[in-house]
Amino acid sequence: MFVDTVSIIVRAGNGGDGATTFSRTAQTSKAGPNGGNGGNGGNIYFQGSNNLTDLRLFRFKKKIVAENGINGGAKNAFGRNAPHVSINLPWGTSVTDLMTRQTYEIRDNSRILIAQGGIGGRGNVAFKSAINRTPLEYEIGTKGQERTMLLDLKMIAQVGLVGLPNAGKSSLLTVLTHATPKIGTYPFTTLDPTVGILLGYAIADLPGLIKGAFKGRGLGIKFLKHIEKTKILVHCIDCTQENPEKAYETVRHEFGEFNPQLLDKPEVILLTKIDLVDEKIVKKITQFFRKKGKTVCTSSIYDPESISKLKKYLISILS
């Protein structure tokens, strides 16, 4: 199951308490203070990883807790600092503090401090003075930071395959890359984004749109947000449908309602399933879109030459 949005609680470790202890001699049990400081609590970091594709790690793990620092001890023994916790997130994840609305973007493998561990308290040896040689004071370690974070993944892919349901996107991804998306003859076979790699470039097969997607109909926003980071859109249009222009305008309308900037992304119109219609129909549809100033390619998964041309075209643009 593809998971792209989840909220979790992160809680850094508390600092350890300082100790109140004294040296012992044959003459007295309080020869002088020797209580050590407590250790610091563990921090929590988020770190980017390009080996992850979604947030399924947090589907059932809703709380991340770091260890507390160890309390100080006698004979000036300092408590051990707790180990830090580093959580890997896929590139393209937006992290938002639900209380402060502070947002972080995971763009690379950099590490970001999310929750600061508590500071260890001082032991009584730190309070010794010329006036007070047997202090009883000590400090309790401070609390670690706790935050509720919303993780929202926007898939990073150079190419996004878009279009109405059953436009042939999944089949196309299969022949362009080594990805194995679910393929069927019914709408919404693809329920989750699937990514394949073409000569180092990521291509995402995104679930099909329907009218009203920007309002949440069908797969709605779950689909639309994943095309915001793509560099180029390949708009797949099924040649066998009665009104290719309407199919195109339906998808473009949803783009504009969700985020008008999507309309400015570089776009290629790809006529799919050309093996199922007469060549004259393909030519007519091609001419229609080219008159509108669109770049048009044609393909059939059963025509290796058309797929080879498409690969070369995409690589030339991306490189």
Image (tube, helix red, strand yellow):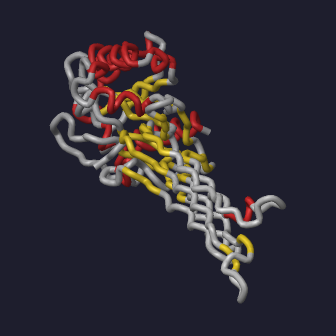
Image x and y of residue 300, in percent: 32, 38
Image x and y of residue 94, in percent: 49, 37
Vertical comparison of 51 with 202: above or below: below
Image x and y of residue 161, in percent: 39, 34
Q: Outermost residue toward the top? A: 291
Name the quarter where the C terminus is drawn.
top right
The image quadrant of residue 133 is: bottom right
Vertical comparison of 29 with 236: above or below: below
Q: Does residue 216 appear to the left or right of 291 in the view shown?
A: left
User: What residue is rendered at 39% in x and 48% in y?
Assistant: 55
User: What residue is rendered at 72% in x and 66% in y?
Assistant: 134
The answer to which of 124 and 3 lies nearer the viewer is: 124
User: What residue is rendered at 70% in x and 78% in y?
Assistant: 23
Q: Does residue 114 appear to the left or right of 4 in the view shown?
A: right
Q: Outermost residue toward the front? A: 27
Image x and y of residue 40, in percent: 61, 59
The image quadrant of residue 288 is: top left
Q: Does residue 75 appear to the left or right of 172 in the view shown?
A: right
Q: Outermost residue toward the right? A: 130
User: What residue is rendered at 29% in x and 16% in y?
Assistant: 250
